[in-house]
Image (cartoon, rainbow, N blue to C red):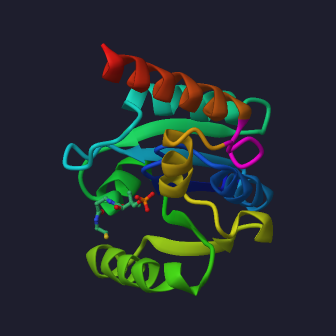
Amino acid sequence: MKERVAIYPGTFDPITNGHMSIIRRALEIFDKLIVAILINPQKKPLFSIEERIFMIKEATKGMGNVEVDTFEGLLVDYAVKKEVNVIIRGLRATSDFEFEFQMALMNRKLNRSVQSIFLMTDYKWLYVSSSIIKEVSSFGGDVKGLVPDIVNEKLREKFRQKSEGGRS
Ligand code: PNS
């Protein structure tokens, strides 16, 4: 039987337990999941692409068939290149719906053979986003338990570096 593969695209700056919940659920449906990080020079990410790849690889170690990759340009073009026709996105509250709906319709307009599938994140992570994690961490707040341990470690390092850099 053909291996069922899906792409889980995103910025992952950084990966959170909300993302992890989606990855776990997707792996219950698909044989393999490609976590694809968008390289977007317009956004100013906190973590470099290499750091994000490293954190996702560490966090998904032993979780099954997960490939971590990067892409530039249109997601549907990347899906065609990878010969995958399923895109996974996570939904938290209804506030996510509008953007996700717009994106799914645009992707469908661009390529009708690529399907979008939405998975609900676990209720524990409804309020967790990469942005809120970065904000809390930047002010020294504790995000332990909301992100994989490796991310917590890297956030502490990052903001320690930043505050040390700021003082000099
Ligand atoms: O984690 P994010 O930032 O919500 O992920 C958004 C992402 C990367 C999935 C989306 O911005 C994307 O697919 N960008 C690639 C460009 C593209 O294909 N745009 C057309 C569909 S909106």
Judge by depth and name the residue closer to the eye, 12 or 165. 165
Residue 124, quarter of the rendered image: bottom right
State the extent of the magenta-drawn residues as a range: 142-148
Quadrant containing the C terminus in the rendered view = top left
Residue shown at 30% from the left, 57% from the top: 77
| Vertical order, 67 against 27 (above or below) | above
| Vertical order, 152 against 135 (above or below) | above
Judge by depth and name the residue closer to the eye, 107 or 15. 15
Residue shown at 50% from the left, 31% from the top: 53
- Expressed as whole percent of the image width and height from the top left, the position of residue 2 reads 66, 53
- Expressed as whole percent of the image width and height from the top left, the position of residue 145 reads 77, 45
Judge by depth and name the residue closer to the eye, 47 or 19. 47
Determine whether, in the image, residue 42 is placed left or right of residue 92: left
Quadrant containing the N terminus in the rendered view = bottom right
- Expressed as whole percent of the image width and height from the top left, the position of residue 105 reads 37, 84
| Vertical order, 140 against 83 (above or below) | above
- Expressed as whole percent of the image width and height from the top left, the position of residue 72 reads 27, 46
- Residue 6 colored magenta? no
- In the picture as drawn, the residue positioned furthest to the left comes out as 42
| Main secondary-structure element of the magenta-colored stretch | loop
- Residue 144 colored magenta? yes
Determine whether, in the image, residue 145 is placed left or right of residue 153: right
Residue shown at 76% from the left, 60% from the top: 25
* Ligand 1 location (quadrant): bottom left
